[in-house]
Image (spheres, rainbow, N blue to C red):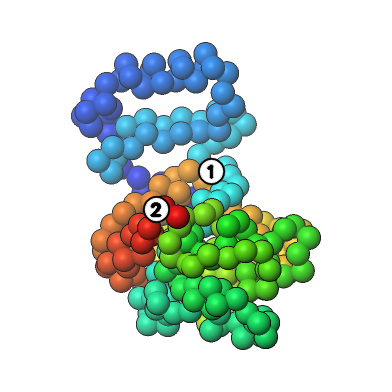
Amino acid sequence: MEPNSLSYATPESLGVPSGAVAVFLDDLTEKDLCMHGFLLIRNGKVAAEGYWPPFDENRKHRMYSVSKSFTSVAIGMMIGDGKLSLDSKAAAFFPEYLPVNAHPHVLEATIRDLLMMATCNEETSYTCDSHDFTETFFTDTRPKHKPGLFFSYDTAATTVLCAILEKLSGKTMLAYMRPVLDEIGFRMTRGACRRLKAARGQGPAFCAPRGTWRASRCCASTRAPGMESNWLTAHICAPRSTGR
């Protein structure tokens, strides 16, 4: 069970009418939505919170692609520790994966590009049947474009970032983040993954709703523990072009 260190206040004291919360809950019921829980937070305090059986405040949920945000935080920590740069070339960390005729755009992709999902790929380079998800980023033979120009949802970008962190630190992402996660009272676990070796240890992540808020609050703070104060601003800037 996670300790509850959140601050609570009445909705009205936070500028939220209680009636609006009631309408929100009625709307959920009317639309027959399958809800697990919710936190309504304003000005850093919880105005309303609720859970639907069998779920409660301690039940951990699979985070799916929310875990990509934690990968970005871990990379930010590594940058803050001086072990990595936004301008580092991803290919430099995996010479063992580079084919003789590696595409020049693959060689150009930087940590910044991967964080922005502005890679050289039109789509994710691997499939569930790929032998090594990270390797496909460098060996995929489909058409490429110059990195840093266009946003394209590319899960391989996060996979490569995790692999870089693991290679440099000798730890899993969660182990590397543990000092910061412990400081903010956040608990996350990793589940089993059918292709864990291919995914570089990126099994599904699980955490409870209150923990998700703690992590969000940490990212929103310019004084987040363990991170350079301006790294978030530095890497979430828009790609250099929005058109082709």
Residue at image coords 35%, 71%: 226
User: Is residue 72 visible in this depiction of the protein?
Assistant: no
Left/right placement of residue 32 relative to residue 243 reads: right
Tell me the quarter of the picture where residue 94 sits. Answer: bottom right
Left/right placement of residue 12 relative to residue 33 reads: left
Amino acid type at image mark 1: Asn
Amino acid type at image mark 2: Thr
Looking at the rendered structure, the secondary structure element under dot 2 is: loop
Q: Residues within 10 Å of mark 1 (few under 14, many from 20)?
A: some
Q: Earlier in the sequence, mark 1 or mark 2?
A: 1
Looking at the rendered structure, the secondary structure element under dot 1 is: loop
Residue at image coords 42%, 82%: 83
Q: Which mark is residue 58?
A: 1
Alpha-carbon distance for marks 1 and 2?
42 Å
Residue 121 at x, y percent in the picture: 57, 62
Say which of marks 1 and 2 sits in front.
Answer: 2
Residue 214 at x, y percent in the picture: 39, 51
Residue named by callout 2: 242
Residue at image coords 49%, 73%: 109
Compare residues 115 and 29 and report the one nearer the observer: 115
Residue 223's place in the image compared with 16, above or below, is below
